[in-house]
Image (cartoon, rainbow, N blue to C red):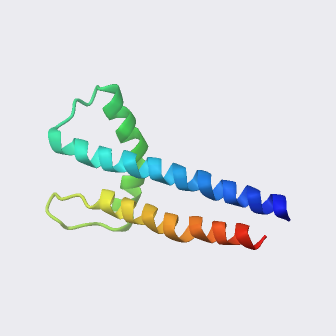
Amino acid sequence: MFVLGIFINAVAGVLNTVLSIYMIIVIVAALITWVNPDPYNPIVRFLFSMTDPVFRRVRRIIPFPTGGLDLSPLIVVLIIVFLQLFLVETLRQVAVRL
């Protein structure tokens, strides 16, 4: 059981790191839309390819009548924070109990 606890704790740490990196990607992608980026820039293409599928799902589930203001990055960041606070911490608590 001790090894299982270490494994679950490691999974929680990796998940927390992946969620943190994705949150940075979401924030940078949201900020870059303010400056009219070059759509052919490889960094811009990477950022948009990583975030647009998630943003589209959020926009489809929660349509925002905000007059052009896209709140989907904010919703995605809130979901990531929730996952970090709830899922990662739950995994760590399970790991401690094992």
**Number of marks in the image?**
0
Q: Quadrant of residue 45?
A: top left
x, y (%) of residue 89? 58, 68
Q: Quadrant of the C terminus?
A: bottom right
Relative to 48, residue 20 above or below: below
Task: Name the residue located 24 percent from the left edge and 46 percent from the top edge.
Answer: 31
x, y (%) of residue 3? 82, 58
Side of 1 relative to 19 (left or right): right
Task: Name the residue located 46 percent from the left edge and 68 percent from the top edge.
Answer: 82
Side of 5 relative to 93 (left or right): right
Q: Quadrant of residue 56?
A: bottom left
In this rendered view, identify the residue nearer to me: 22 or 17.
Answer: 17
Q: Is residue 52 visible?
A: no
Task: Name the residue located 50 percent from the left edge and 64 percent from the top edge.
Answer: 84
x, y (%) of residue 16? 54, 56
Q: Is residue 39 visible?
A: yes
Farthest residue to the right: give it.
1
x, y (%) of residue 27? 32, 50
Side of 35 relative to 52 (left or right): left
Q: Quadrant of the N terminus?
A: bottom right
Relative to 25, residue 46 above or below: above
Task: Name the residue located 75 percent from the left edge and 73 percent from the top edge.
Answer: 97
In this rendered view, identify the residue nearer to me: 29 or 20.
Answer: 20
Relative to 83, residue 15 above or below: above
